[in-house]
Amino acid sequence: MRLSDRLAEQLRSLIDEQGLRPGDRLPAERRLAEALGASRPSVREAIRQLASQGLLRSRQGGGTYVQAREPAADDWPDRHLVRPLDELVSDDPEYRYDVLEARHALEGGTAWHAALRATAEDRRAIQRCFEDIVRFQSSGDPALSARADARFHLAIAEASHNAVLLQMMRGVFELLRSTVTENRQRMYLIQHTQDQLTAQHQALMEAILRGDAEAARTTVWRHLEFVHGSVRKLDEDEARRARSSRLPPFSLTS
């Protein structure tokens, strides 16, 4: 487990142990570093991670506060709607394309509203997620690149400040958590695809940062169409190789 992941879990436990409730302010960063036995930059990264998950929110010049927690996936009142879909995806991978189509509908809205509503902190969070994508990609780690990619899209959903869209986005990523990660890792293994994904994410980020809602929506649509086409081609190539491997060996001898 990465240090930032471990510290995030420790910080989450500390919040529970101290009985902090939504709206309560966290101790100063220096005190948290002492309590967790870690450096302040590491604690800062853990705070950013929990903020990206919706547990914390930092106010510029005003400290970090606990936010109202979203219900865990198993506690959602509509979890019975997600389970049948999860089973469908497990039984037939073709359903992943239905989820991509659903993302197309959802993320057009989240990108549009994020461009119009993102706060300064939201913009910084989106930029940090994009920087994580580039950093992990440069280090040759497709798994972490894929996770950063997912966090980037969820950060945009959070910046939309539409609770329904955000909950639906989280449901989509929960539904296909393993499949989405697998697809992204496969794509990040291909260099030219990496470069295209990075350019698309950068264009989306820049549209949101400058407040261009129309460009943000169009850019995310084009990005998801590219993802859809790339995943489809990867699946077709794998199916073709599997068929070829089942052919009997050919011999020139009689």
Image (cartoon, grey):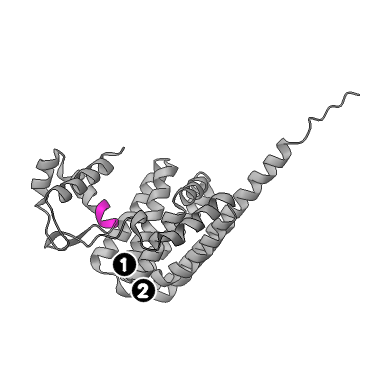
Q: Is residue 93 left or right of residue 67?
A: right
- Toward which corner of the image does residue 164 lie, by quadrant? bottom left
Q: Residue furthest top?
A: 253
Q: Amino acid at mark 1?
A: Ala
Q: Residue at x 66, y 45 (%)?
A: 239
Q: Is residue 132 above or below residue 103?
A: above
Q: Is residue 141 left or right of residue 38?
A: right
Q: Is residue 20 left or right of residue 188?
A: left
Q: Residue at x 38, y 60 (%)?
A: 170
Task: Identify the mark nearer the N-term, 2 or 1.
Answer: 2
Of helix, strand and loop, which one carries label 2? helix
Which residue does the numbered mark 1 point to in the structure image? 159
Q: Residue at x 43, y 76 (%)?
A: 214
The x, y position of residue 53, in whole percent, is: 29, 56
Give the magenta-colored segment's residue range.
49-53
Q: Is residue 11 above or below residue 249?
A: below
Q: Residues within 10 Å of mark 2 (few under 14, many from 20)?
A: many
Q: Is residue 166 above or below residue 52?
A: below
Of helix, strand and loop, which one carries label 1? helix
The x, y position of residue 80, in whole percent, is: 44, 60
* Marking on residue 113: 2
The x, y position of residue 240, in whole percent, is: 69, 45
- The reply to whether dot 2 and dot 1 touch (C-beta < 8 Å) is yes
